[in-house]
Image (cartoon, rainbow, N blue to C red):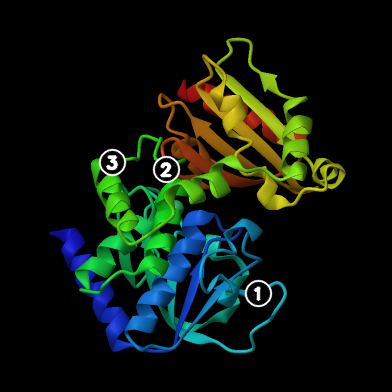
Amino acid sequence: MQYERELRQTQAFLTEHDDFLVVAHVQPDGDAVSSTLAVGWLLSCLGKKYVMVNEGPIPKRMAYLRQAERIVDLSAEPLNRKFDYVICVDCADFKRVGTTKELFAEGAKLLNIDHHPTNDGYGDINLIVPHAAATAEILFDLIHFMGLELNETIATALYTGLLTDTGGFRYSNTSPKVMAAASKLLEYGVDGPGLSELLLEQMTLSQLRLLTRSLNGLQLTEDGKISWVVVTDEDLKSAGAVHEDMEGIVNYPRNIQGVEVGLLFKVIDEQAVKVSMRSAGKVDVAKVAQSFGGGGHVRAAGARVEGTLDTIVPRVVEQVRLQL
Ligand SMILES: [Mn+2]
C-alpha cells in the first residue's frame, strides 16, 4: 500500500535526521499553523531539534494554540542560518513556502506533507494524500502510525486543522474518517464548540466592515452563475483590516443561490492580484487556478496572477465560464 510506504519513509526521515526546519505556506490558515505545530510536537516526542518558521505572522485568533508563539515570523525576525532537513506542510507547491526558502541549505532534503491534489511532489520524500480533508488528518495518521500517544495540546492543534479546512465539518471533504478522527480528538478534551465559536463564528469589527465594503461591489454574470468581489488595499485600510480579515469573504458570492463559482480578487500591488475561488461542485476550480499558475482543491483553490485588476477579472471569469 502506497500510503503505508509513504508513512514509513516519513517516519524514517524524522527518526534518522536531526535539526529540522518546519515551514508551512504563506499567509497561513488554521491547517497550516496546526500542522506546523503538530510536526513540532512530533519532533519533540522524538527528542529532535527543530525550528518552526513562517514567512509572516501567525493569525492572532490562533494564539490559543500551544507553542504558536514559537513559530518564527521571518518578516520580523531574520534567521542567519540554513537547514539541511526541511519539512513543508500544507504547501501545494514549492513556491508556497515563500521567503522561508532562504533558510534551505543547498541540497537540503525536503519532506513534503500535504493534501492538495495539485501537489506536484516537490519533496525528496512525499507524504501526499489528495483525499485527506486537511494536512492535520495526515498528521493524525502519522502520529498513530508512529505509535505516539495524543494529549490535549496536540489534539487541539489537529482538531483546529480539521475544523477550519472542512469549514466546520460541512464541506464535501468531511469524510467518515474525518468525523472519526474528530471524535477521537474530542476524547482528549478538545473544546469543540469553543473552537467553532472562535474560528468560524466570531468576527472582528474591522472584518465586518471589510465584508460590508466588499459586498457593496459584488458582481454577478448575466446568467447568475459566477459572482465575485474585490478587495483593494484601500478597502483594507479604510476598514482598519488586515490580511487575515479577508478569510471567508469569498464564501458570500459563492453562497448566492444559483451561483456555481464565487471569486475574491485581492489586489496585492500594481502588478499582481490574488484570486480565491470557491465552487458549488460542478466546476473544478483547482483546474482554473492551475491555468493561472496556482492550485488547490476541486471546490477551493487560488492563484496569484500577474497583471492589473482590469485585465485579470475578465480573464479569470472567462476561464471559469469555459468550465461551466
Ligand atoms: Mn490544508
Quadrant in which the N terminus appears: bottom left
Q: Toward the viewer: 214 or 67?
A: 67
The answer to which of 309 and 235 lies nearer the viewer is 235
The amino acid beneath tag 3 is: Ser
x, y percent for residue 224: 58, 13
Q: In the figure, is residue 33 to the left or right of 154?
A: right
Say which of 217 and 177 sits in front: 177
Proximity of marks 3 and 1: CB atoms separated by less than 8 Å? no
**Please, what is the three-letter code of the amino acid marked with disc 2?**
Thr
Foreground mark, 2 or 1, reads 2
**Residue 120 visible in the picture:** no
Identify the secondary structure beneath mark 1. loop
Residue at x-position 65% and y-position 66%? 56
Instruction: Estimate the x, y position of residue 100 in percent, counting from the top left.
Output: 58, 73
Q: Which residue is mark 2?
A: 166
**Which residue position holds label 1?**
74
Q: Horizontal and vertical percent for residue 155? A: 37, 63
Residue at the spot x=37%, y=53% of the render?
115
The answer to which quarter of the image holds residue 277 is top right
Which mark lies nearer to you, 3 or 1? 3
Q: Earlier in the sequence, mark 3 or mark 1?
A: 1
Image position of 63 (left or right of 123)? right
Using the image, tell me which numbered label, if any, was put on residue 175.
Answer: 3
Residue 173 in picture, x, y percent from top left: 35, 40
Q: For numbered disc 3, what is the local secondary structure?
A: loop
Residue type indicated by callout 1: Leu
N-terminal of the pair, mark 3 or mark 2, is: 2
Q: Are marks 3 and 2 in contact (CB under 8 Å)?
A: no
Marks 2 and 1 sit apart, C-alpha to C-alpha, by 28 Å
